[in-house]
Image (cartoon, rainbow, N blue to C red):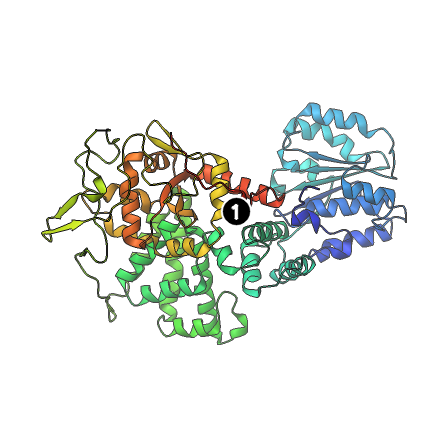
Amino acid sequence: MAYKALYRTYRPMTFDEVAGQEHIVTTIKNALKNNKLAHAYLFAGPRGTGKTTMAKLLAKALNCEEGIGCQCNHCENCVAINEGTHPDVIEIDAASNNGVDDVRDLIDKVKYGSILGKYKVYIIDEVHMMSASAFNALLKTLEEPPENVVFILCTTEPHKVLPTILSRCQRYDFTKLKDEDIYNRVVQVLNKEHIEVNKDAVDLIVQLADGGMRDALSILDQVLAYSNNRLVTQDILNIFSLETNEEKIGLLTDISKNRLQSVLTRLNRYFSKGTDIKRLTDDLLNILKDLLIYQNTSDQTLLQSIKIEDVRKLSAELSGEDVMKYIDAFMEVTNEYKNVSSINPLFEICVLKLCSLNKGKKVETEQVEEDIEISVEESIQEVVDSAPIEEVIEEEEDEPDLLTQEIVIEEKEEVITAPEVNETISKHDTLLSDDYVPHILKCEVKEDHYYLDFDSLINIGVLAKNRDIKNELLNRWGDISVYLTHPVAGSVAALLSDARPLIASSDVLILETKTKNQAAKANLVSNQALIQQIIYQIFDRKFFVYSLNREESVDFQQGYTNRQQVSKLPKPSDIKLEFEGE
Protein backbone atom coordinates (compact mmCIF):
# COMPACT_ATOMS: atom_id res chain seq x y z
CA MET A 1 0.00 0.00 0.00
CA ALA A 2 1.25 3.49 -0.88
CA TYR A 3 2.57 5.65 1.94
CA LYS A 4 0.01 8.01 3.49
CA ALA A 5 1.19 11.38 4.79
CA LEU A 6 0.99 11.93 8.53
CA TYR A 7 -1.47 14.81 8.29
CA ARG A 8 -3.87 12.50 6.42
CA THR A 9 -3.19 9.45 8.59
CA TYR A 10 -3.89 11.34 11.81
CA ARG A 11 -6.71 13.59 10.61
CA PRO A 12 -9.35 13.89 13.41
CA MET A 13 -12.14 11.34 13.10
CA THR A 14 -14.54 12.97 15.58
CA PHE A 15 -15.21 16.45 16.98
CA ASP A 16 -13.53 15.44 20.23
CA GLU A 17 -10.22 14.77 18.44
CA VAL A 18 -10.00 18.27 16.94
CA ALA A 19 -7.08 20.26 18.37
CA GLY A 20 -8.08 23.80 19.28
CA GLN A 21 -11.05 25.65 17.71
CA GLU A 22 -13.14 24.89 20.81
CA HIS A 23 -15.56 27.75 20.06
CA ILE A 24 -16.41 26.26 16.68
CA VAL A 25 -16.62 22.65 17.86
CA THR A 26 -18.91 23.57 20.75
CA THR A 27 -21.22 25.70 18.57
CA ILE A 28 -21.63 23.04 15.88
CA LYS A 29 -22.17 20.23 18.39
CA ASN A 30 -24.90 22.25 20.13
CA ALA A 31 -26.53 23.12 16.81
CA LEU A 32 -26.66 19.44 15.87
CA LYS A 33 -27.97 18.48 19.29
CA ASN A 34 -30.77 21.07 19.17
CA ASN A 35 -31.53 20.54 15.46
CA LYS A 36 -30.65 24.14 14.59
CA LEU A 37 -28.81 23.50 11.34
CA ALA A 38 -27.95 26.24 8.86
CA HIS A 39 -28.27 25.60 5.13
CA ALA A 40 -24.91 27.24 4.37
CA TYR A 41 -21.70 27.62 6.39
CA LEU A 42 -18.57 29.65 5.72
CA PHE A 43 -15.37 28.33 7.33
CA ALA A 44 -12.67 31.02 7.13
CA GLY A 45 -9.14 31.10 8.52
CA PRO A 46 -5.42 30.49 7.91
CA ARG A 47 -4.24 27.38 6.09
CA GLY A 48 -3.90 24.14 7.99
CA THR A 49 -6.19 25.13 10.86
CA GLY A 50 -8.90 22.50 10.27
CA LYS A 51 -11.48 24.05 7.91
CA THR A 52 -11.82 21.10 5.51
CA THR A 53 -11.47 18.61 8.35
CA MET A 54 -14.35 20.28 10.21
CA ALA A 55 -16.44 20.26 7.03
CA LYS A 56 -15.98 16.49 6.67
CA LEU A 57 -16.75 15.93 10.36
CA LEU A 58 -19.97 17.91 9.95
CA ALA A 59 -20.86 15.83 6.89
CA LYS A 60 -20.36 12.64 8.96
CA ALA A 61 -22.43 14.06 11.83
CA LEU A 62 -25.30 14.71 9.39
CA ASN A 63 -25.24 11.27 7.78
CA CYS A 64 -24.09 8.81 10.48
CA GLU A 65 -26.49 5.87 10.74
CA GLU A 66 -26.43 6.13 14.53
CA GLY A 67 -28.16 9.51 14.33
CA ILE A 68 -27.61 13.23 13.78
CA GLY A 69 -24.53 14.44 15.63
CA CYS A 70 -22.89 11.01 15.86
CA GLN A 71 -19.61 9.99 14.23
CA CYS A 72 -19.28 6.25 14.77
CA ASN A 73 -16.72 5.74 11.96
CA HIS A 74 -18.06 2.20 11.51
CA CYS A 75 -21.28 2.56 9.55
CA GLU A 76 -21.39 2.59 5.76
CA ASN A 77 -21.83 6.37 5.56
CA CYS A 78 -18.96 7.21 7.96
CA VAL A 79 -16.56 4.79 6.27
CA ALA A 80 -17.41 6.15 2.80
CA ILE A 81 -16.89 9.76 3.93
CA ASN A 82 -13.56 8.86 5.56
CA GLU A 83 -12.43 7.24 2.30
CA GLY A 84 -13.71 10.11 0.16
CA THR A 85 -16.12 7.90 -1.81
CA HIS A 86 -19.50 8.95 -0.42
CA PRO A 87 -21.84 9.86 -3.30
CA ASP A 88 -23.67 12.51 -1.25
CA VAL A 89 -20.58 14.37 0.04
CA ILE A 90 -19.23 16.32 -2.91
CA GLU A 91 -15.91 18.17 -2.59
CA ILE A 92 -15.29 20.90 -5.16
CA ASP A 93 -12.03 22.78 -5.65
CA ALA A 94 -13.10 26.30 -6.60
CA ALA A 95 -9.56 27.10 -7.71
CA SER A 96 -10.01 24.90 -10.79
CA ASN A 97 -13.83 24.85 -11.03
CA ASN A 98 -14.55 28.54 -10.71
CA GLY A 99 -16.53 29.34 -13.84
CA VAL A 100 -20.23 30.03 -14.23
CA ASP A 101 -20.68 26.80 -16.22
CA ASP A 102 -19.27 24.76 -13.32
CA VAL A 103 -21.74 26.39 -10.93
CA ARG A 104 -24.69 25.85 -13.26
CA ASP A 105 -23.77 22.18 -13.47
CA LEU A 106 -23.70 22.04 -9.66
CA ILE A 107 -27.11 23.76 -9.43
CA ASP A 108 -28.63 21.27 -11.86
CA LYS A 109 -27.54 18.37 -9.63
CA VAL A 110 -28.60 19.96 -6.33
CA LYS A 111 -32.28 19.30 -6.98
CA TYR A 112 -31.77 15.52 -7.01
CA GLY A 113 -32.24 13.60 -3.77
CA SER A 114 -29.46 11.95 -1.76
CA ILE A 115 -28.33 8.43 -2.67
CA LEU A 116 -26.85 6.88 0.47
CA GLY A 117 -27.13 9.34 3.33
CA LYS A 118 -29.79 11.66 4.68
CA TYR A 119 -28.12 14.89 3.55
CA LYS A 120 -26.22 15.99 0.46
CA VAL A 121 -23.23 18.06 1.55
CA TYR A 122 -21.33 20.31 -0.89
CA ILE A 123 -17.87 21.28 0.37
CA ILE A 124 -16.46 24.08 -1.81
CA ASP A 125 -12.80 24.69 -1.01
CA GLU A 126 -10.97 27.96 -1.78
CA VAL A 127 -14.36 29.52 -2.58
CA HIS A 128 -12.81 32.99 -2.91
CA MET A 129 -11.36 31.86 -6.26
CA MET A 130 -14.80 31.76 -7.89
CA SER A 131 -15.57 34.42 -10.47
CA ALA A 132 -18.19 37.11 -9.82
CA SER A 133 -20.54 35.58 -12.40
CA ALA A 134 -20.16 32.16 -10.73
CA PHE A 135 -20.99 33.70 -7.33
CA ASN A 136 -24.07 35.38 -8.76
CA ALA A 137 -25.26 32.13 -10.31
CA LEU A 138 -24.94 30.43 -6.91
CA LEU A 139 -26.78 33.12 -4.93
CA LYS A 140 -30.37 31.89 -5.24
CA THR A 141 -29.52 28.23 -4.62
CA LEU A 142 -27.32 29.13 -1.68
CA GLU A 143 -30.09 31.16 -0.09
CA GLU A 144 -32.87 28.59 -0.59
CA PRO A 145 -31.41 25.13 -1.21
CA PRO A 146 -33.49 21.92 -0.95
CA GLU A 147 -34.11 20.80 2.62
CA ASN A 148 -31.64 17.91 2.41
CA VAL A 149 -28.73 20.01 1.05
CA VAL A 150 -26.02 21.77 3.10
CA PHE A 151 -23.31 23.98 1.61
CA ILE A 152 -19.97 24.39 3.40
CA LEU A 153 -17.71 27.05 1.87
CA CYS A 154 -14.04 27.10 2.94
CA THR A 155 -11.63 29.96 2.33
CA THR A 156 -8.37 31.48 3.55
CA GLU A 157 -9.40 34.92 2.20
CA PRO A 158 -12.97 35.73 3.23
CA HIS A 159 -12.57 39.38 2.23
CA LYS A 160 -12.57 38.25 -1.42
CA VAL A 161 -15.97 36.58 -1.12
CA LEU A 162 -18.90 38.69 -2.31
CA PRO A 163 -20.87 40.32 0.54
CA THR A 164 -24.07 38.86 -0.93
CA ILE A 165 -22.60 35.37 -0.43
CA LEU A 166 -21.34 36.16 3.08
CA SER A 167 -24.76 37.38 4.16
CA ARG A 168 -26.31 34.04 3.23
CA CYS A 169 -23.89 31.93 5.27
CA GLN A 170 -23.30 31.21 8.94
CA ARG A 171 -19.69 32.25 9.35
CA TYR A 172 -17.09 30.53 11.55
CA ASP A 173 -13.62 32.06 11.87
CA PHE A 174 -10.83 29.53 12.48
CA THR A 175 -7.80 30.86 14.34
CA LYS A 176 -4.19 29.75 14.44
CA LEU A 177 -3.76 26.90 16.89
CA LYS A 178 -2.05 27.41 20.23
CA ASP A 179 1.53 26.15 20.43
CA GLU A 180 0.49 23.87 23.27
CA ASP A 181 -2.20 22.19 21.13
CA ILE A 182 0.23 21.60 18.27
CA TYR A 183 2.92 20.33 20.65
CA ASN A 184 0.56 17.82 22.25
CA ARG A 185 -0.66 16.57 18.87
CA VAL A 186 2.88 16.13 17.50
CA VAL A 187 3.90 14.20 20.64
CA GLN A 188 0.79 12.04 20.29
CA VAL A 189 1.70 11.22 16.67
CA LEU A 190 5.30 10.42 17.63
CA ASN A 191 4.10 8.03 20.32
CA LYS A 192 1.78 6.28 17.90
CA GLU A 193 4.63 5.99 15.39
CA HIS A 194 6.91 4.60 18.15
CA ILE A 195 9.46 7.38 17.69
CA GLU A 196 11.38 8.85 20.60
CA VAL A 197 10.24 12.36 21.52
CA ASN A 198 12.89 15.10 21.41
CA LYS A 199 11.42 18.13 23.21
CA ASP A 200 13.76 20.69 21.61
CA ALA A 201 13.01 19.30 18.16
CA VAL A 202 9.25 19.31 18.76
CA ASP A 203 9.47 22.91 20.00
CA LEU A 204 11.26 23.83 16.78
CA ILE A 205 8.59 22.12 14.66
CA VAL A 206 5.88 24.01 16.57
CA GLN A 207 7.71 27.26 15.91
CA LEU A 208 8.01 26.51 12.19
CA ALA A 209 4.34 25.50 11.93
CA ASP A 210 3.22 29.00 12.94
CA GLY A 211 -0.18 27.89 14.22
CA GLY A 212 -0.98 25.39 11.46
CA MET A 213 -1.51 21.76 12.44
CA ARG A 214 -1.18 20.48 8.89
CA ASP A 215 2.10 22.34 8.48
CA ALA A 216 3.38 20.85 11.74
CA LEU A 217 2.64 17.28 10.66
CA SER A 218 4.03 17.89 7.16
CA ILE A 219 7.26 19.24 8.66
CA LEU A 220 7.43 16.25 11.00
CA ASP A 221 6.92 13.91 8.03
CA GLN A 222 9.78 15.55 6.12
CA VAL A 223 12.14 15.45 9.09
CA LEU A 224 11.44 11.77 9.80
CA ALA A 225 12.07 10.92 6.14
CA TYR A 226 15.38 12.81 6.23
CA SER A 227 16.52 11.33 9.54
CA ASN A 228 15.38 7.71 9.09
CA ASN A 229 12.53 7.90 11.61
CA ARG A 230 14.53 9.82 14.19
CA LEU A 231 13.78 13.31 15.47
CA VAL A 232 17.06 15.27 15.52
CA THR A 233 17.18 19.01 16.19
CA GLN A 234 20.24 19.60 14.02
CA ASP A 235 18.56 17.89 11.06
CA ILE A 236 15.62 20.29 11.31
CA LEU A 237 18.03 23.24 11.35
CA ASN A 238 19.80 21.89 8.26
CA ILE A 239 16.63 21.09 6.31
CA PHE A 240 15.06 24.50 6.82
CA SER A 241 18.30 26.54 6.81
CA LEU A 242 17.88 27.77 10.38
CA GLU A 243 20.31 28.90 13.05
CA THR A 244 20.46 27.74 16.67
CA ASN A 245 19.45 30.01 19.53
CA GLU A 246 23.07 29.93 20.66
CA GLU A 247 24.12 31.35 17.28
CA LYS A 248 21.50 34.12 17.43
CA ILE A 249 22.56 35.09 20.94
CA GLY A 250 26.17 35.10 19.76
CA LEU A 251 25.31 37.43 16.87
CA LEU A 252 23.50 39.90 19.14
CA THR A 253 26.38 39.79 21.62
CA ASP A 254 28.96 40.47 18.89
CA ILE A 255 26.86 43.38 17.60
CA SER A 256 26.57 44.85 21.08
CA LYS A 257 30.35 44.68 21.56
CA ASN A 258 31.09 45.99 18.06
CA ARG A 259 33.09 42.89 17.13
CA LEU A 260 32.92 43.75 13.45
CA GLN A 261 35.18 40.97 12.19
CA SER A 262 33.23 38.30 14.06
CA VAL A 263 29.90 39.74 12.85
CA LEU A 264 31.04 39.71 9.22
CA THR A 265 32.28 36.13 9.58
CA ARG A 266 28.89 35.08 10.92
CA LEU A 267 27.05 36.88 8.09
CA ASN A 268 29.24 35.25 5.43
CA ARG A 269 28.50 31.87 6.95
CA TYR A 270 24.75 32.54 6.92
CA PHE A 271 24.78 33.65 3.30
CA SER A 272 27.01 30.82 2.08
CA LYS A 273 24.93 28.05 3.68
CA GLY A 274 21.62 29.57 2.59
CA THR A 275 20.23 30.54 6.00
CA ASP A 276 16.63 31.81 5.84
CA ILE A 277 17.35 35.48 6.56
CA LYS A 278 13.69 36.47 6.88
CA ARG A 279 13.12 33.87 9.58
CA LEU A 280 16.42 34.79 11.23
CA THR A 281 15.25 38.41 11.43
CA ASP A 282 11.93 37.33 12.94
CA ASP A 283 13.74 35.13 15.45
CA LEU A 284 16.02 37.99 16.48
CA LEU A 285 12.95 40.19 17.00
CA ASN A 286 11.35 37.52 19.20
CA ILE A 287 14.51 37.26 21.28
CA LEU A 288 14.66 41.04 21.70
CA LYS A 289 10.96 41.09 22.59
CA ASP A 290 11.58 38.53 25.35
CA LEU A 291 14.57 40.54 26.53
CA LEU A 292 12.50 43.74 26.70
CA ILE A 293 9.70 42.00 28.60
CA TYR A 294 12.13 40.55 31.13
CA GLN A 295 13.92 43.86 31.64
CA ASN A 296 10.60 45.49 32.50
CA THR A 297 8.97 42.69 34.51
CA SER A 298 11.73 40.35 35.77
CA ASP A 299 9.20 37.54 35.20
CA GLN A 300 10.93 34.60 33.53
CA THR A 301 7.63 32.71 33.06
CA LEU A 302 6.79 35.17 30.26
CA LEU A 303 9.80 34.12 28.16
CA GLN A 304 8.93 32.29 24.94
CA SER A 305 11.97 32.35 22.65
CA ILE A 306 15.04 32.02 24.90
CA LYS A 307 16.13 30.66 28.24
CA ILE A 308 16.58 32.77 31.36
CA GLU A 309 20.38 32.38 31.33
CA ASP A 310 20.52 33.80 27.78
CA VAL A 311 18.29 36.70 28.78
CA ARG A 312 20.58 37.55 31.69
CA LYS A 313 23.61 37.34 29.44
CA LEU A 314 22.09 39.74 26.91
CA SER A 315 20.78 42.08 29.63
CA ALA A 316 24.37 42.63 30.73
CA GLU A 317 25.22 43.83 27.22
CA LEU A 318 22.09 45.71 26.09
CA SER A 319 20.18 48.38 27.96
CA GLY A 320 16.45 48.88 27.48
CA GLU A 321 17.22 51.80 25.15
CA ASP A 322 19.57 49.62 23.07
CA VAL A 323 16.95 46.88 22.81
CA MET A 324 14.38 49.36 21.45
CA LYS A 325 16.88 50.62 18.86
CA TYR A 326 17.60 47.05 17.77
CA ILE A 327 13.89 46.26 17.53
CA ASP A 328 13.23 49.40 15.45
CA ALA A 329 16.11 48.57 13.10
CA PHE A 330 15.04 44.95 12.51
CA MET A 331 11.36 45.92 12.05
CA GLU A 332 12.36 48.56 9.52
CA VAL A 333 14.50 46.14 7.50
CA THR A 334 11.71 43.52 7.62
CA ASN A 335 9.35 46.01 5.95
CA GLU A 336 11.96 46.65 3.25
CA TYR A 337 12.43 42.96 2.37
CA LYS A 338 9.36 42.92 0.12
CA ASN A 339 10.76 45.76 -2.02
CA VAL A 340 14.03 44.11 -3.07
CA SER A 341 15.02 41.02 -5.03
CA SER A 342 17.85 40.06 -2.64
CA ILE A 343 17.43 40.61 1.09
CA ASN A 344 20.96 39.61 2.14
CA PRO A 345 22.55 43.04 1.51
CA LEU A 346 19.72 44.76 3.43
CA PHE A 347 20.21 42.52 6.44
CA GLU A 348 23.97 43.04 6.33
CA ILE A 349 23.59 46.85 6.19
CA CYS A 350 21.11 46.74 9.09
CA VAL A 351 23.56 44.75 11.24
CA LEU A 352 26.46 47.05 10.35
CA LYS A 353 24.37 50.07 11.33
CA LEU A 354 23.67 48.48 14.69
CA CYS A 355 27.39 47.84 15.15
CA SER A 356 28.07 51.51 14.49
CA LEU A 357 25.74 52.45 17.37
CA ASN A 358 28.27 50.88 19.72
CA LYS A 359 31.34 52.81 18.57
CA GLY A 360 31.39 54.75 21.79
CA LYS A 361 31.68 51.54 23.80
CA LYS A 362 34.86 49.63 24.45
CA VAL A 363 35.54 47.77 21.21
CA GLU A 364 36.74 44.20 21.46
CA THR A 365 38.80 43.43 18.38
CA GLU A 366 39.82 39.99 17.25
CA GLN A 367 43.31 39.15 16.13
CA VAL A 368 43.02 38.60 12.37
CA GLU A 369 45.97 38.26 10.05
CA GLU A 370 45.86 40.81 7.28
CA ASP A 371 47.82 38.65 4.88
CA ILE A 372 46.94 35.01 4.27
CA GLU A 373 50.13 32.96 4.40
CA ILE A 374 49.94 29.68 2.59
CA SER A 375 52.61 27.17 3.61
CA VAL A 376 53.66 23.94 1.94
CA GLU A 377 52.92 21.89 5.06
CA GLU A 378 49.38 23.22 5.58
CA SER A 379 47.82 23.83 2.16
CA ILE A 380 48.06 23.81 -1.59
CA GLN A 381 48.15 26.74 -3.98
CA GLU A 382 45.48 27.45 -6.60
CA VAL A 383 45.89 26.64 -10.29
CA VAL A 384 47.41 29.41 -12.37
CA ASP A 385 46.47 29.45 -16.03
CA SER A 386 46.46 32.30 -18.50
CA ALA A 387 43.12 31.32 -20.04
CA PRO A 388 39.88 32.56 -18.38
CA ILE A 389 38.43 30.14 -15.83
CA GLU A 390 35.25 29.61 -17.85
CA GLU A 391 37.14 28.49 -20.97
CA VAL A 392 37.66 24.82 -21.71
CA ILE A 393 41.29 23.70 -21.51
CA GLU A 394 42.21 22.50 -24.98
CA GLU A 395 43.48 18.97 -25.28
CA GLU A 396 47.15 18.91 -26.20
CA GLU A 397 49.38 15.92 -26.58
CA ASP A 398 52.19 17.20 -24.31
CA GLU A 399 50.10 19.41 -21.99
CA PRO A 400 51.60 19.49 -18.45
CA ASP A 401 49.50 18.52 -15.44
CA LEU A 402 48.06 21.80 -14.18
CA LEU A 403 47.83 20.54 -10.62
CA THR A 404 51.58 19.88 -10.38
CA GLN A 405 52.81 23.17 -11.86
CA GLU A 406 55.14 25.31 -9.79
CA ILE A 407 53.38 28.49 -8.74
CA VAL A 408 55.13 31.69 -7.73
CA ILE A 409 53.31 33.88 -5.20
CA GLU A 410 54.45 37.43 -5.80
CA GLU A 411 53.60 38.66 -2.31
CA LYS A 412 55.66 35.95 -0.57
CA GLU A 413 58.18 35.14 -3.30
CA GLU A 414 57.81 31.44 -2.54
CA VAL A 415 57.57 28.45 -4.83
CA ILE A 416 54.69 26.16 -3.93
CA THR A 417 54.14 22.71 -5.39
CA ALA A 418 50.59 21.38 -5.24
CA PRO A 419 49.85 17.75 -4.35
CA GLU A 420 49.52 15.49 -7.33
CA VAL A 421 46.26 14.17 -8.70
CA ASN A 422 46.47 11.13 -10.89
CA GLU A 423 45.11 12.37 -14.18
CA THR A 424 45.66 15.41 -16.36
CA ILE A 425 42.54 17.45 -17.15
CA SER A 426 41.45 17.55 -20.75
CA LYS A 427 38.25 17.92 -22.68
CA HIS A 428 37.18 14.31 -22.35
CA ASP A 429 39.05 13.10 -19.27
CA THR A 430 37.36 12.47 -15.94
CA LEU A 431 39.69 14.54 -13.77
CA LEU A 432 40.11 11.79 -11.20
CA SER A 433 41.04 8.13 -11.18
CA ASP A 434 38.42 5.39 -10.80
CA ASP A 435 39.38 4.62 -7.21
CA TYR A 436 39.23 8.33 -6.33
CA VAL A 437 35.61 8.82 -7.38
CA PRO A 438 33.96 5.42 -6.90
CA HIS A 439 30.40 6.61 -6.22
CA ILE A 440 29.49 8.38 -9.46
CA LEU A 441 27.36 6.43 -11.93
CA LYS A 442 26.78 7.37 -15.56
CA CYS A 443 28.61 10.66 -15.30
CA GLU A 444 28.93 12.15 -18.78
CA VAL A 445 30.77 15.10 -20.30
CA LYS A 446 28.38 16.97 -22.55
CA GLU A 447 29.73 19.98 -24.40
CA ASP A 448 32.54 20.20 -21.85
CA HIS A 449 30.11 20.06 -18.91
CA TYR A 450 29.66 17.24 -16.44
CA TYR A 451 26.19 15.72 -16.23
CA LEU A 452 24.74 13.36 -13.58
CA ASP A 453 21.37 11.68 -14.14
CA PHE A 454 18.70 11.42 -11.44
CA ASP A 455 19.44 7.80 -10.51
CA SER A 456 23.09 8.67 -9.97
CA LEU A 457 22.12 11.48 -7.60
CA ILE A 458 19.81 9.11 -5.70
CA ASN A 459 22.67 6.62 -5.35
CA ILE A 460 25.05 9.29 -4.08
CA GLY A 461 22.39 10.39 -1.59
CA VAL A 462 22.08 6.83 -0.31
CA LEU A 463 25.85 6.54 0.10
CA ALA A 464 26.00 9.87 1.99
CA LYS A 465 25.18 8.21 5.31
CA ASN A 466 27.52 10.28 7.45
CA ARG A 467 26.01 13.75 7.79
CA ASP A 468 28.99 14.86 9.89
CA ILE A 469 30.80 15.60 6.63
CA LYS A 470 28.01 17.85 5.40
CA ASN A 471 27.71 19.58 8.77
CA GLU A 472 31.45 20.25 8.78
CA LEU A 473 31.18 21.79 5.32
CA LEU A 474 28.15 23.90 6.27
CA ASN A 475 29.74 25.22 9.44
CA ARG A 476 32.92 26.35 7.68
CA TRP A 477 31.65 27.10 4.18
CA GLY A 478 32.02 30.84 4.80
CA ASP A 479 35.81 30.38 5.05
CA ILE A 480 35.90 30.18 1.25
CA SER A 481 35.45 33.96 1.24
CA VAL A 482 39.17 34.42 1.98
CA TYR A 483 39.83 33.61 -1.69
CA LEU A 484 37.32 36.10 -3.14
CA THR A 485 40.07 38.65 -3.84
CA HIS A 486 42.55 36.15 -5.29
CA PRO A 487 43.50 37.18 -8.86
CA VAL A 488 43.11 33.64 -10.27
CA ALA A 489 40.72 31.78 -7.98
CA GLY A 490 38.48 34.73 -7.08
CA SER A 491 35.71 34.08 -9.61
CA VAL A 492 35.50 30.38 -8.71
CA ALA A 493 35.54 31.24 -5.00
CA ALA A 494 32.64 33.64 -5.60
CA LEU A 495 30.77 30.83 -7.35
CA LEU A 496 31.33 28.50 -4.38
CA SER A 497 30.46 31.18 -1.81
CA ASP A 498 27.09 31.70 -3.47
CA ALA A 499 26.34 27.95 -3.38
CA ARG A 500 25.69 25.62 -0.45
CA PRO A 501 26.45 21.93 0.21
CA LEU A 502 23.44 19.70 -0.49
CA ILE A 503 24.86 16.14 -0.32
CA ALA A 504 28.30 15.04 0.82
CA SER A 505 29.59 11.47 0.67
CA SER A 506 33.20 10.60 1.39
CA ASP A 507 34.20 11.30 -2.23
CA VAL A 508 31.42 13.31 -3.86
CA LEU A 509 30.04 16.75 -2.99
CA ILE A 510 26.78 17.96 -4.54
CA LEU A 511 26.21 21.72 -4.33
CA GLU A 512 23.02 23.75 -4.71
CA THR A 513 23.35 27.03 -6.62
CA LYS A 514 20.80 29.83 -6.90
CA THR A 515 20.68 29.95 -10.71
CA LYS A 516 21.01 27.63 -13.68
CA ASN A 517 23.90 29.70 -15.00
CA GLN A 518 25.88 29.24 -11.79
CA ALA A 519 25.35 25.47 -11.87
CA ALA A 520 26.42 25.28 -15.51
CA LYS A 521 29.58 27.27 -14.80
CA ALA A 522 30.45 25.12 -11.79
CA ASN A 523 30.03 21.94 -13.86
CA LEU A 524 32.52 23.06 -16.52
CA VAL A 525 35.31 20.51 -16.81
CA SER A 526 37.81 23.37 -16.94
CA ASN A 527 36.68 24.72 -13.55
CA GLN A 528 36.78 21.44 -11.64
CA ALA A 529 40.47 21.60 -10.73
CA LEU A 530 40.24 25.02 -9.07
CA ILE A 531 37.01 24.07 -7.30
CA GLN A 532 38.63 20.92 -5.91
CA GLN A 533 41.76 22.74 -4.80
CA ILE A 534 39.90 25.53 -2.96
CA ILE A 535 37.79 22.98 -1.10
CA TYR A 536 40.85 20.83 -0.35
CA GLN A 537 42.72 23.83 1.01
CA ILE A 538 39.84 24.83 3.33
CA PHE A 539 38.58 21.42 4.44
CA ASP A 540 41.51 19.08 3.75
CA ARG A 541 39.13 16.79 1.82
CA LYS A 542 39.16 15.63 -1.79
CA PHE A 543 35.79 15.66 -3.56
CA PHE A 544 34.43 15.38 -7.04
CA VAL A 545 32.10 18.42 -7.07
CA TYR A 546 28.85 18.59 -9.02
CA SER A 547 26.22 21.37 -8.90
CA LEU A 548 22.43 21.54 -9.15
CA ASN A 549 20.42 24.73 -9.44
CA ARG A 550 17.70 25.39 -6.85
CA GLU A 551 14.88 24.06 -9.03
CA GLU A 552 16.77 20.82 -9.73
CA SER A 553 17.60 20.53 -6.02
CA VAL A 554 13.92 20.75 -5.02
CA ASP A 555 12.97 18.12 -7.63
CA PHE A 556 15.74 15.81 -6.44
CA GLN A 557 14.86 16.12 -2.75
CA GLN A 558 11.18 15.50 -3.46
CA GLY A 559 12.03 12.49 -5.60
CA TYR A 560 14.36 11.14 -2.93
CA THR A 561 11.67 11.51 -0.26
CA ASN A 562 9.05 9.85 -2.49
CA ARG A 563 11.29 6.86 -3.15
CA GLN A 564 12.18 6.57 0.52
CA GLN A 565 8.55 6.61 1.58
CA VAL A 566 7.69 3.70 -0.72
CA SER A 567 10.94 1.84 0.13
CA LYS A 568 12.30 2.18 -3.42
CA LEU A 569 15.73 3.53 -2.51
CA PRO A 570 18.62 1.27 -3.48
CA LYS A 571 20.66 -0.34 -0.74
CA PRO A 572 24.34 0.61 -0.58
CA SER A 573 25.19 -2.98 -1.53
CA ASP A 574 23.09 -2.64 -4.70
CA ILE A 575 25.09 0.32 -6.00
CA LYS A 576 27.80 -0.46 -8.51
CA LEU A 577 30.93 1.44 -7.66
CA GLU A 578 32.08 2.49 -11.08
CA PHE A 579 32.75 5.67 -13.01
CA GLU A 580 31.64 6.04 -16.59
CA GLY A 581 33.03 8.93 -18.58
CA GLU A 582 32.18 9.90 -22.14
Q: Quadrant of the N terminus?
A: top right
Q: Furthest-right residue in view?
A: 66
Q: How many numbered dots are placed on residues in this image?
A: 1
Considering only vertical position in the picture, is 287 above or below 441? below
- Does residue 356 appear anywhere in the picture? no
Tag 1, which secondary structure? helix
Query: Position of 572 compared to 312: left or right?
Result: right
Decide which of 120, 268 is in the foreground and name it.
Answer: 268
Residue appearing at x 86%, y 53% in the figure = 33
Considering only vertical position in the picture, is 243 above or below 139? below
Residue 561 occupies which quadrant of the picture?
top right
> Which residue is the site of mark 1?
572
Residue 184 occupies which quadrant of the picture?
bottom right
Residue appearing at x 37%, y 61% in the figure = 326
- Does residue 501 appear anywhere in the picture? yes
- Locate residue 109, reporting x and y percent: 80, 27
Local crowd at mark 1 within 10 Å, few (<14), some, or many (≥20)? some
Residue 25 occupies which quadrant of the picture?
bottom right
